């Protein structure tokens, strides 16, 4: 039977920060088979103003692109989350499963 862990990581999370090391240890200690994170968990939450800002959206996409490569450090069989993507000049929330 698989253990499922649900997490709400802090706003502003970057895999280069010390907080990421703490998260790695917590996940290792919990030893889940499946990890479900909060939506778009990396970087600062960008959609806080009504007006769309393409540069901010691109920065958020890039933060997630970098972090996606680091998720394997968690040594979890499956991770379910989402990430921002730019599609036809619009920011969308894309689910992913590793």
Image (tube, rainbow, N blue to C red):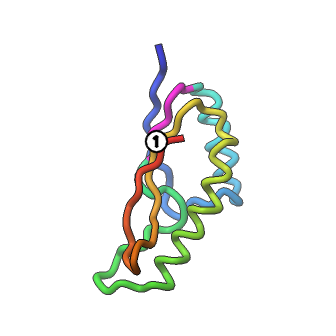
Considering depth in this image, is 69 or 43 the residue closer to the camera? 69
**Residue annotated with mark 1:** 80
- Picture quadrant of residue 47: bottom left
Which residue is painted at 62% across and 57% down in the image?
A: 67
- Which residue ends up furthest to the front in the rendered image? 88
- Find the residue positioned furthest to the top: 1
Give the residue at x 59% y 67%: 63
Question: What residue do we see at 54% from left, 26% from top?
Answer: 32
Q: Does 57 appear in magenta?
A: no
- Who's the residue at 61% across and 54% down the image? 68
* Image vertical order of residue 69 relative to residue 62, above or below: above
> In the rendered structure, does residue 36 fall within the stretch colored magenta?
yes
Q: Position of residue 61 (x, y in %)?
A: 53, 69
Label total for image? 1
Residue 16 at x, y percent in the picture: 71, 60
Q: Secondary structure at mark 1?
A: strand
Residues 16 and 76: in front is 76
Please state if 53 lies on the left or on the right of 74 as rendered.
Answer: left
Residue 11 position, x and y percent, is 48, 61
Most distant residue in the left direction:
50
Image position, residue 57 (x, y; %): 46, 77
Front residue (pair 40, 65): 65
Q: Residues within 10 Å of mark 1 (few under 14, many from 20)?
A: some
Q: In which quadrant is the C terminus drawn?
A: top right
* Range of residues picked out in magenta: 32-37
Residue 15 is left or right of residue 39, and the answer is right
Figure quadrant of residue 23: top right
């Amino acid at each position: 039977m698989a253990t499922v862990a649900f997490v709400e990581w802090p706003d502003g999370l970057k895999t280069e920060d010390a907080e990421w090391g703490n998260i790695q240890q917590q996940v290792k200690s919990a030893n889940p088979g499946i990890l479900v994170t909060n939506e778009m968990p990396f970087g600062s939450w960008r959609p806080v103003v009504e007006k769309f800002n393409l540069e901010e959206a691109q920065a958020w996409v890039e933060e997630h692109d970098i972090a996606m490569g680091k998720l394997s450090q968690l040594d979890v069989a499956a991770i379910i989350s989402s990430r921002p993507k730019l599609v036809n000049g619009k920011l969308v929330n894309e689910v992913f499963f590793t």
